[in-house]
Image: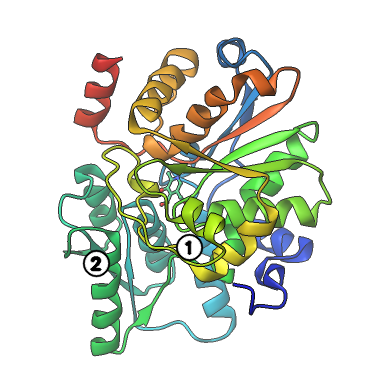
Amino acid sequence: MTARLDPTALLPTLADIEAAAAVVYRDFPPTPQYRWGLLSERLGTDCWLKHENHTPVGAFKIRGGLTYFDQLAQRGALPREVVSATRGNHGQSMGWAARRHGVACTIVVPHGNSVEKNAAMRALGVTLIEHGEDFQEAREHAMRLAAERGAHMVPSFHPDLLRGVATYWWEFLRAVPQLDVVYVPIGQGSGACSAIAAKHALQHPVRVVGVVSRHATTYADSIAAGRVVESPVSTQLADGMACRVADADALAVLAPHLDHVVQVSDDEVAAAMHALFTDTHNVAEGAGAAPLAAALQERAALRGQQVGLALTGGNVDAAVFAHTLRAG
Ligand SMILES: Cc1ncc(COP(=O)(O)O)c(C=O)c1O
């Protein structure tokens, strides 16, 4: 990552983000952000949630899909078919945006993927293929498929995805400008890079804390090592964060700009899912609850601060959620 001169050149500017918001708002309005009383009591300080669980696919990813396809359309480069890999929310985003532009969409998921996320993708018109044991294997298969078919491979991390994703952080920082610190989950890094983009675009001093699963530590390990380090994935609950190999471009943005990285265990994530339900009656999937799990770890240091948490998605299978609530 040291070979890259200016990694922030990948990030959308304020003008890019404003233009992206206009694209996103053709499909849905800004999501709400609320200061929840019980959650603030639990954290011992003011706690705001950004409700990305309230987009039309129940996760922030849709914003990136809309701008990715819009950029293709603006270049006159809409393909006949797109192929991508996902654990679910990126695939829903692709399905939504592909349908909007009349493009065929094939998505590869690993075996054992969320049943309900798979159903939601199919309902958006996606042709779903199950391949491999984890996201990385699904991704490699998707790349082979795209090459064989002459289809357009959509990566999980790309500047045209960041433009759209950055709109949720831009909304959040403008709506709650007093935020001191925000927590963002990291899978392939588009959400965290977008938080940094919005912070820079708005010249906001907020500290951005990255959150990884303790059972999927490639970004924490790579930041510590100063190069991409592959790390095993064994999380059962935080599928949105289940990445084995960090993206080099995302790493180059995150390493110098994240305040720090927190690792959360599946038990902590389960407790945070339970707490979010009890305190706000919103359903969070594992990755969506990870920011609260991280903030609770750091509770003592957060006293007196305005804390923002990205509730990035609510797409958890009913059986998994029922188990999580019962266990809590
Ligand atoms: C709900 C949710 N939160 C967080 C993430 C991680 O996002 P990123 O891959 O942009 O780092 C994902 C990724 O799919 C997700 O679905």
Note whether 15 is above or below 121 in the view shown.
below
User: Tag 2 or tag 1, which sits nearer the N-term?
Assistant: 1
View extreme (right): residue: 203
Q: Nearer the viewer, mark 1 or mark 2?
A: 2
> Foreground residue, 194 or 259?
259
Residue at numbered disc 1:
65
Location of the N terminus (image quadrant) = bottom right
Note whether 69 is above or below 17 in the view shown.
below
Which residue is located at x 60 percent, y 20 percent? 299
Note whether 328 is above or below 104 in the view shown.
above
Which residue is located at x 77 percent, y 64 percent? 15
> Foreground residue, 210 or 124?
210
**Labels 1 and 2 touching (C-beta < 8 A):** no
Which residue is located at x 39 percent, y 57 percent? 90
Amino acid at pointer 2 = Glu
Is there any visible trace of residue 177 in the rendered image? yes
Location of the C terminus (image quadrant) = top left
Apparent side of residue 236 relative to residue 26 in the rendered image (left or right): left
Which residue is located at x 36 percent, y 55 percent? 92
Amino acid at pointer 1 = Gly
Label 2 packing within 10 angstroms: few (<14), some (14-19), many (20+): some
| Secondary element at image label 1 | helix
Residue at numbered disc 2:
137
Determine if the C-beta at disc 2 is less than 8 A from ligand 1: no
Quadrant of res 85 = bottom left
Label 1 packing within 10 angstroms: few (<14), some (14-19), many (20+): many
Per the model, the C-alpha gap separating discs 1 and 2 is 22 Å
Residue 56 in the image, given as x and y percentages of width and height: 44, 45
Residue 113 in the image, given as x and y percentages of width and height: 21, 50
Apparent side of residue 120 relative to residue 42 in the rendered image (left or right): left
- Residue 319 has which mark? none
